[in-house]
Amino acid sequence: MGGFKRTSFLTRSLIPDRNSGKNEPTGLPRMHRLKKGVLIVFEGVDGAGKSTQARLLYERLTKAQFEAELSKEPTEGTWGKKLRKLIKEGRGDVGPQEELEWFIKDRFQHVEEIIKPGLEKNKIIILDRYYFSTIAYQGALGVDPREIEKRNGEFAPEPNLLFLIEIPPGAGIKRIKESRGKETDSFERESYLLRVSQIFHSLEKPFIYRLSGEESVQKLSDQTWEITTAHLKEHNLIER
């Protein structure tokens, strides 16, 4: 599964990329309509650059006239806010199993209110973290990853594409400290992130693309754009 799976053809002839400044169409741009919704997920340890890449792909797709939505987990809902507070202030007396329940409740609301409705409207939904993060992060606390996957699989749709951005945990923590100018939170200890990284590395799904987080921001963005547009073309998802 390792390595970036390169496509064997270019997609620019079908989908102009306004981010590159090439192949600009003449006249007014026409919205690309999809035949079905597409779910794209970005995962990786803290500091890997997934949030940046999720945002860049969203921007490139919308500039290319695709209807897309960008969302994240934990959400800004009731359970998501509880989780964000826990991440910022520390777990305290909240155990791994209780924490898992919070993530599942937050994700269920996310699926029902954002993900499923967007997919039903044939949009491209881009997620900054999804249940694979729960598998890795809560799995690293001792919860059975198979149990986590099973429970999420009961209500959460599988992604069409999952970009797993891989970086050594130490390098990710260094980036976080440099960007924030302060210490890391309770989810960002190197020994813990090493276990998280190992679980991410063990994931084997046909929709996973493993990308090096040590590449430049632009190169990673170009890779996710190429893979995404190739997927749309290969599966004949764009209405003519």
Image (cartoon, grey):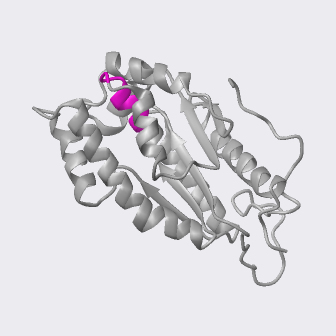
Viewer-side residue, 50 vs 140 = 140
Image coordinates of residue 145 in percent, x first then y, are 42, 28
Q: Which quadrant of the rendered structure holds the C terminus?
A: bottom right
Q: In this view, does 120 lie above or below 101?
A: below
Residue at x-position 63% and y-position 34%: 205
Q: Main secondary structure of the magenta part?
A: helix
Image coordinates of residue 211 in percent, x first then y, are 63, 32
Q: Was residue 68 drawn as part of the magenta stretch in this picture? A: no
Q: In this view, does 123 lie to the left or right of 91?
A: right
Q: Is residue 174 above or below residue 218?
A: above
Q: Was residue 136 drawn as part of the magenta stretch in this picture? A: yes
Image coordinates of residue 174 in percent, x first then y, are 38, 25
Region in magenta: 133-142
Q: Is residue 160 above or below residue 31?
A: above
Image coordinates of residue 197 in percent, x first then y, are 46, 23
Residue found at the very far top of the displayed protein: 191
Viewer-side residue, 141 vs 54 = 141
Q: Which quadrant of the rendered structure holds the N terminus?
A: top right
Residue at x-position 32% and y-position 30%: 177
Viewer-side residue, 26 vs 61 = 61
Residue at x-position 45% and y-position 53%: 155
Residue at x-position 53% and y-position 50%: 54
Q: Is residue 36 visible?
A: yes
Q: Quadrant of residue 78?
A: bottom left
Residue found at the very far bottom of the displayed protein: 28
All told, the count of numbered labels is: 0
Q: Quadrant of residue 5?
A: top right
Q: Can residue 182 be seen in this view?
A: no
Q: In this view, does 34 lie to the left or right of 54?
A: right
